[in-house]
Image (cartoon, rainbow, N blue to C red):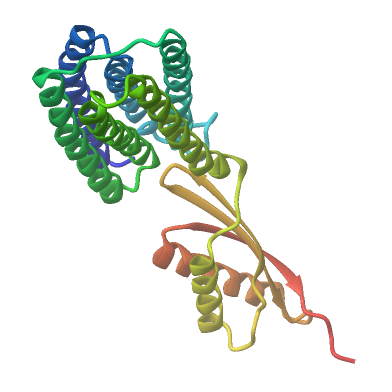
Amino acid sequence: MSQESHKLTLLSGWISIIGNILLFIVKLWAGLVTGSVALIADAWHTLSDSASSLVVIISANFSIKPADKEHPFGHGRIELISSIIIGVMLAFVAFDFFIQAIDKLRHRETVVFGTFAIVATVLSIIVKEGMAQYAIWASKKVDSPMLRADAWHHRSDALSSVIILIGIFLAPLWWWIDGVLGIVVSLFIIHTTVTLFKENINPLLGEEPDKAMINSIHKICDEQFEQHVNAHHFHLHRYGRHKELTFHIRLPGNMDLQNAHKIASTIERSVEKNLNVIATIHMEPMESKK
């Protein structure tokens, strides 16, 4: 992580923490005044964003550390691990409020919303979507999966507030609306959690490059050697922003080692220059034509 990326990540984290704590106070107050499990769940969902942003800040300070003897590829994967931690935190929040919503339905508890609840919910929608947009912009600027995870966390909170706002206006018609909305918010959080897991577990396990990267590598290989080298067996390893790629190429079996090494090294340098990926190439002999 560069110094610029580090500063932008820290700024995003602190903005999130301060904003979320203020929103938590407002939304929790509105929830306690009305007795709404959906509003209280939404308030704690907001506070969980502060915890996830704290994880972002701690992880940013770890991931900026350079490679060392114990971690030769750097500390970038701490961002992927942190994103998974954020997902786990979301899952606990979702489960807790799902149970509370079911309990409210069982006891047929009703809620009377007031102007304060409406104002608090609208404020939450505006502020949380603003935070999401900023985190998305920052994640694209510094290519951070951790900030993308935090952005989804903000957006899930904004969308759950939209659902609650709709429910506030429907509450006079149906007594059960608050309990149902609590369940809907919980399911929405679970969906966000699953998305975060899918996006961040695959890079930890190792993955195949996307088709765009593979096509670019084939093009680079064709430019460096007049004969098709049949690049194949691609494996991509991501360490935060640092990427390592291994793949095989085929060269004539009678080619001397010096020339073969020169071609492989030229391709590796070109891949690094054009794709910002460190490549390691395994050379295989072409099958001789009979």
- Which image quarter holds the C terminus? bottom right
Q: From what the image shows, is residue 62 above or below residue 266?
A: above
Residue at 64 percent of width and 77 percent of height: 259
* x, y percent for residue 215: 53, 73
Residue 130: percent from the left, percent from the top?
A: 17, 39
Residue 232: x and y in percent read 67, 68
Q: Quadrant of residue 263?
A: bottom right
The part of the image, by quadrant, that contains residue 113 is top left
Q: Give the camera-side residue of 106 and 246.
A: 106
Residue 140 horizontal side relative to residue 250, left or right = left
Residue visible at 46% across and 69% down in the picture:
270
Q: Is residue 43 above or below residue 245?
A: above
Q: Position of residue 262 (x, y in %)?
A: 58, 73
As drawn, is 256 to the left or to the right of 264?
A: right
- Whether 47 is drawn above or below 226: the answer is above
Residue drawn at 26 percent across, 50 percent down: 141
Instruction: Name the image quarter holding the N terminus.
Output: top left
As drawn, 107 above or below 212: above
Residue furthest out toward the front: 173
Q: Which of the 4 quarters of the picture holds residue 17?
A: top left
Residue furthest to the bottom in view is: 290
Left or right position of 233 against 62: right
Report the front residue among 50 and 99.
99
